Amino acid sequence: MTQHNRAKFQPSGKIQFGIFFQGVNSGTIWKTPESGSQTDFESFRRIAQTAERGLFAAFFLGEGLRLREHLGRPHALDVAGRPDAQTMLAALASVTSNIGLVATQNTTYNDPADLAHRLASLDLLSGGRAAWNVVTTDNAWTGANFRRGGYLDHADRYVHAEAFVETAKKIWDSWEDGAVSSSVSADSWAVPGHTRRVHHSGQHYSVDVTPRLPRSVQYRPVLFQAGDSPEGRDFAARQADVIFSAHPKFDDAVEFRAHIVARSLAAGRGANDVQIMPASEFILAATDEEAREKKEWIRSLQIGPQQAVAYLEQFWGRELSAYDPDGPLPEIDPVVEETSETRGSGFHGAKARQLAEQWRAEAKEKGLSIRQFVSSRTSRVDATFTGSYTAVADTLAEYARVGAVDGFNISPWLIPTGLDDIVNHLVPELQERGVYPTEYVGSTLRENLGLATPLRSGAFEPVPAGGAR
Ligand SMILES: Cc1cc2nc3c(=O)[nH]c(=O)nc-3n(C[C@H](O)[C@H](O)[C@H](O)COP(=O)(O)O)c2cc1C
C-alpha cells in the first residue's frame, strides 16, 4: 500500500462477527427451560460450533478473577464465576477448526514471561488462532488475591500495560523462522544465532528469559484491547490489532472510528491498521413487531426484581430489599461517599449522593420504576439491535458501507442456543447483501481478520546454540 493510502481510512465494505460468551452479568438469561449452564463445557462447545457454522471470526472470553461481591455476598447478577479462559479455549481448539480464540487477560496482575508463554502455547495448539484481549482491569478487589496485592493507579496501569505488551511481543518474536534444526542428525536442537534472549528491567517487573516456544503460523497471537479512556485509546492505537469497543451506536461508532484513525496515524501506523468490534446484542424475529415483543420478554428476564434492587444497592451502599422493585427509586440517601460499582463502569468512584439525586429525578421524569430504570441503565441499551432479520441486515450493511466498525462482538442473551437465529437468518441476509464473509479465507485468525503479518520487534541479544540432540 502506498503512503497516501495508509494515511486515509478506507472502509472494507464488510463486517465480521465475534461471539462474546459473557457468563456473568445481567445480559444472559439463566432461568428459562432452554437456559444451559454457564460453566459446563457443553455450553461453550455448542456456542463455538454454531459460531463457526456462521463463519464468525472469533470466540471471545472475558476475565473476572474474583466473583463479584455485594454487601459481603456474591453479586446477585452473577450466577457463578467464569472458567479460566485459556483452559476453556484450549479445549475449544480441539472441537473447532477455523474460529479465532480470544482470551481476555489483564496486565495488572499477570506477568509477561508467563502469560506470553501460555498464549504462545494456545496459538501453537490451535494452529494460529489465538488472540489476547489486553485489559488493565478496573477490578480493584481482585488484587487481594495476588502476591503483589494492591491496585495500580489508572495512569500507571497503561504504563505497565505498554511495557508488558512490548515484552510479550519480544518474547513471541524471539525465535527466527527455522530456529529449530529440521534434521535429526544436527548437532543441536537450535540453529546458532536463531533464538534471542529477552531482558526487561522495569518499575513493575523484570524479565530475563530465553523464550521456550517457536512462533506459530500466524507469528504471534492477535492483540485485542478493551479500555475506553484517552490513555486506553492511545494504547490501543499503538499496540492493538482490534479494539473491543463500547461504541456500537451508529453516530458514536463513526466518531470513535475517527478518534482511532487519528490516533493510529499519530502513532505512525496506517489508518486501517486498527480494527474495531463493539460489544452488541441482537434481538431478532421474522417481523419488527415480533422482535419488539421478544425484547420486552428478554428484558423482563434479564433484570429480575432482586437483581434490580441489588444493582441500586451498589450505588447506595446499603440494603434496599424493603423497596418495591416496581415502585419508585429509594428516597433515602446513599450511606457511602463514592459509588463502588463492581466493574467496568464510568460510575466507579462517582459521588454517590449526587448520582442518586440525578437518577431519582430522571426516573421520576420518565415515570420509571426501579426495575424499569435499572433495565434502562445497562450498557445493552445502546448495544442492542432489535428488528426483523432483513431490517437489521440493512442496518448492518450501512455500518459496513461507511466503515463505522469492522464487526460486532455479540453477547447472546441465551446460552447455548442464542446464536442460532443469527447464524440461520441474519448471516444469510448479510451474505446476500455482500457485506459478510462466505467462507473462512485462511486457517489463522490473522488471515481471517485480514490483518497484516506483524513486523518482528527490535533486535536483542542472540542466544548461543544449545541443547545437544
Ligand atoms: C468492552 C469492554 C470489555 C471489557 N472486558 C473486561 C474484562 O473482561 N475483564 C476485565 O477485567 N476488564 C474488562 N474491561 C475493563 C478494562 O480492563 C479497563 O479496566 C476499564 O475499561 C478501565 O480502563 P479505561 O479507563 O481505559 O476504560 C473491559 C472494558 C471494555 C470497554
Image (spheres, grey):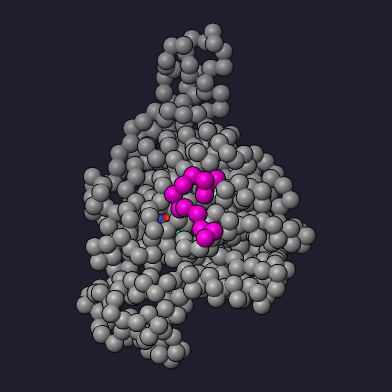
Residue 38 part of the magenta-drawn span = yes
Seen from this angle, which residue lies furthest front? 33
Seen from this angle, which residue lies furthest right? 432
Q: Is residue 99 above or below residue 358?
A: above
Q: Is residue 324 above or below residue 447?
A: below
Q: Is residue 342 above or below residue 369?
A: above
- Whereabouts is ligand 1, in terms of quadrant? bottom left
Q: For the point 23% across and 45% down, which residue is it?
A: 147
Q: Is residue 309 above or below residue 26?
A: below
Residue 129 appears in which quarter of the rendering?
A: top right
Give percent across and percent down for residue 53: 66, 48
Give percent across and percent down for residue 310: 33, 71
For the image, the number of numbered tags is 0
Q: Can residue 167 be seen from the camera position used here?
A: yes
Kindly report the secondary structure that dominates the magenta region of the rendered protein: loop
Q: For the point 44% across and 40% down, which residue is it?
A: 87
Judged left or right of residue 91, residue 327 is left
Give percent across and percent down for residue 255: 56, 70
Q: Start and end of the magenta stretch?
A: 33-45
Residue 409 part of the magenta-drawn span = no
Q: For the point 29% across and 58% down, which residue is it?
A: 140
Q: Can residue 461 be seen from the camera position used here?
A: no
Seen from this angle, which residue lies furthest bottom? 365
Give percent across and percent down for residue 246: 50, 65
In depth, the one of 158 and 408 nearer the eye is 408
Judged left or right of residue 25, residue 151 is left
In depth, the one of 342 and 288 nearer the eye is 288
In depth, the one of 329 and 146 nearer the eye is 329
Q: For the point 67% across and 41% down, which residue is it?
A: 442
